[in-house]
Amino acid sequence: KQEVTQIPAALSVPEGENLVLNCSFTDSAIYNLQWFRQDPGKGLTSLLLIQSSQREQTSGRLNASLDKSSGRSTLYIAASQPGDSATYLCAVSTNQAGTALIFGKGTTLSVSS
Amino acid sequence: NAGVTQTPKFQVLKTGQSMTLQCAQDMNHNSMYWYRQDPGMGLRLIYYSASEGTTDKGEVPNGYNVSRLNKREFSLRLESAAPSQTSVYFCASRNSGVNTGELFFGEGSRLTVL
């Protein structure tokens, strides 16, 4: 059974710091991996989607990498800002139809000014 | 850009009452999903619809029913609400297939069952 783990559960950094959030999964047979951001009391906002054939995706200050063989993905945030404070979740699709999606429990990031 | 729209945003029910959560997407996605999010449990799939006319159970379907009314709309019904169904419910949609796309979420429906 696929399991997705995000460590640490919480992270506090000062503004301007570069940081890495981790996501690991137990079964390397995934079709894609997606990173989300969730603000308190809000829905999930898609940040980056990496297909299984890709190694990384970039959007602005965000860079997500995927290493299927080791069952890991990282989300790199450059020059963090207080507005980046949120919970970050990763999710893996375990079938081609995209109907089976396993979520991690998230890392809550706090960026202080 | 509306994206995924859920109604209502907040609801308080008494045990045994019924209600329907509505969800609509305007992105022409074929697949739609209902999740619940509880503290410490993360997001759990209740039901999904891979395409118009089909629905399937997810991880926690007991106590719920769904209807895929058309390609745009996917509703979730609680026939007899229980306190254990107090949660935040999210609807989501995506295009699924050879190149499965991004999953987009609604803002959530916060349900309290007394």
Image (tube, coloured by chain):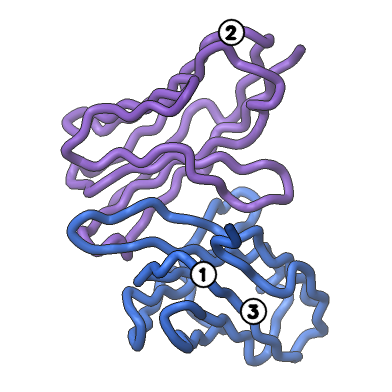
**Crowdedness of circle 3 by 10 Å Cα count: few (<14), some, many (20+)?**
many
Provide residue A32's location: percent of width, then percent of height: 27, 45
Residue B75: image x %, image y %?
55, 82
B49 left or right, relative to A16: left
* Disc on res. B21: 3
Number of marks in the image?
Answer: 3
Do tags 3 and 2 sit on the same chain? no
Q: Which chain is blue?
A: B
Callout 1 amino acid: Gln
Q: Which residue is mark 1?
A: B25
Q: Are marks 2 and 1 on the same chain?
A: no
Instruction: Tell which residue pokes out farthest to the front in this image.
Output: B1
Label for residue B42? none
* Quadrant in which residue B48 is drawn: bottom left
Q: Is residue B36 visible?
A: no
Q: Residue at x 62, y 8 (%)?
A: A16
Identify the image quadrant of the N terminus of chain B: bottom right
Chain seen in purple:
A
Can you say whether A59 is above or below B34 in the image? above
Which amino acid is tagged 2?
Glu
For label 1, the SS is strand
Q: Chain of mark 3?
A: B
A105 or B10, which is in the foreground? B10
